[in-house]
Amino acid sequence: MLFPLFVMLLWKLKANAKVVVWGLGAAFLASLLLSVVASSWKPVAAFYLLPTRGWELAAGGLVFLVSRNSAYFLRFSKLLLWLGSALLIVSMFLIDSDFSWPSGWALLPVLGASCLLLAQSNSVLLHNPLTQWLGDRSYSLYLWHWPLVVALYFAGLQQEWLWVTGAFSLSLLVGHLSYLFVETPTRIYLSSSSFIKQVIVLALVGLVIGLMAVSVRLFSFVNRLPAAVEIIAGESTNRNPRQDQCMGVSDKENRPVDCFFNDLDLAVISIGDSHNSATFTALGVAAEKSNLNAMHWAKGSCPLLKGAKYQNREPGCHEFNEKIFARLNGSFENIPVVLTSRLTRALVGGNEEGVNAQGRPQIYFTKEVSNGFSPAFQAEFRKSLIETSCLLVKKRPVYLVRPIPEIAINVPATLARNMLFGRGDDDIKITLADYHQRNKLVWDAQDQAAQQCGVKILDPLPYLCDDEYCYGSRDGRPLYYDDDHLSEYGNKFLVPMFEQVFKDQ
């Protein structure tokens, strides 16, 4: 809707096709650059928002404008045809879920499609009944395939090829019917109507859709799902009630926010990232049992490591940590410190479903790195963890919490889907062997810190795992509110672990 207005504005500036071409070219480059930057930093926003996808639409406008000189491009028709085909084929086989998207990689299919359009070829590759049929219905197919993809994902059937084939065939059928009975009649009706009637019809349709969307957000639909499923799904919101007030402020202002559990005497400080926030109430409950208080400082994705910096997000983590070191150096002597962070993700990237970051560290020390398994980077990580531990333990007891098991899939959502689609209510779990394989680097570094500095280790595995598995749910109830953060229900399993801090005092 905005694209025609943008082109009209360019034309108003000067009624010259070159002005429009230069304007679209500038929009193309600016949007593409933003897409490349945002695809690694804010991948969801980069995928969905206009500023990071507008370059693809601008590419279509540029193709239309430059193709008016058809005689020039016809000289290179075969070259453009084969180049465009090659780019599309390379895109299909090269680009997979390990690539940031759309980023610069989207240039391959966009340039491929542009070349095919500029070729204006009568090749049988493009001019045959099948491609013409698909081309006519391409927009309807695009609209209808997506809800079917989402339905397969929601039902957990996205890897079942029989269902995938059925959904693919259904998208062709529904797309064809939509083209015949919605798209074509609507286009004919609107094109034969007056401008005022077009505006009224489109406004009414937009109003109806808008009201439906708003009603879904504002109104509660009672008994929309079975009660058991609602309870399971509700665990996704069962998190630290003061998370926004405490960690949220730290994220925005890059400073430690004092968040106390109660009004008793302070006996322990919990420091770390969102895993610290997700386990803090368990530490608070353990403190309260001894008539004591707990405080926590937490910033998302920021473990307390000397010299640690965000990849591509300076100076948040480093600044936050330096303020913590300064405060601990000046006060809070003899107050025990508990360090809880998702260290494995910081070291080798996340492993959750849909995240293409495995092997890519979240932090760096001397320079940004792309491989978390690099021996040099691991040596820096180990040195920082040991240096941090030895620095803190000079004035107080220090406890290092072993990595919380990462389940890799959203536990409440998966458990709710399994029950909703009749796939049983078996508990979600990972093998203990997989846990140790993923977290070995962190365990080794923590063991070295314990040996060299005398810090103590708190191990959550006896409370979340057995001899074979680490559990994301127990007896059908999730222990996590997503794939790796313990819920307010799940973190209570760690109260006995944290009680050790107060028994030592």
Image (spheres, rainbow, N blue to C red):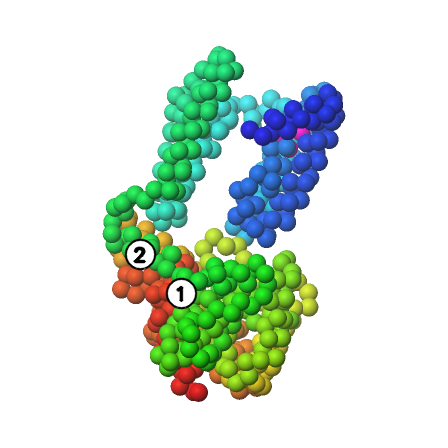
Q: Residue at x 60, y 81 (%)?
A: 391
Q: From the viewer's side, name the closer residue of 157 and 206.
A: 206
Residue behind mark 2: 232
* 60 is within the stretch colored magenta: yes
Above or below residue 102? Residue 426 is below
View extreme (front): residue: 263
* 479 is within the stretch colored magenta: no
Residue behind mark 1: 486
Q: Amino acid at mark 2?
A: Ile
Residue 451 drawn at (x, y percent): 54, 86
Residue 213 drawn at (x, y percent): 40, 37
Q: Where's the C terminus, which quadrant?
A: bottom left
Q: From the viewer's side, name the closer residue of 343 and 469.
A: 343
Q: Quadrant of residue 32?
A: top right
Residue 365 drawn at (x, y percent): 65, 68
Above or below residue 241? Residue 224 is above
Q: From mark 1 to mark 2, how far is it between C-alphas?
A: 14 Å
Q: Amino acid at mark 1?
A: Leu
In the image, which residues are magenta?
A: 59-63
Q: Main secondary structure of the magenta part?
A: helix
Left or right of 173? Residue 449 is right
Q: Residue at x 64, y 33 (%)?
A: 59
Q: Residue at x 59, y 52 (%)?
A: 40
Tell me which numbered mark, 1 or 2, is placed earlier along the sequence. Answer: 2
Local crowd size for mark 2, using a 10 Å CA cut-off: few (<14), some (14–19), many (≥20): many
Q: Where's the N terminus, which quadrant?
A: top right
Q: Quadrant of residue 53?
A: top right
Left or right of 370? Residue 467 is left
Q: From the viewer's side, name the closer residue of 326 and 124.
A: 326
Q: Which mark is residue 472?
A: none
Q: Considering the numbered disc 1 on the image, is that residue within a helix, a strand or a loop?
A: loop
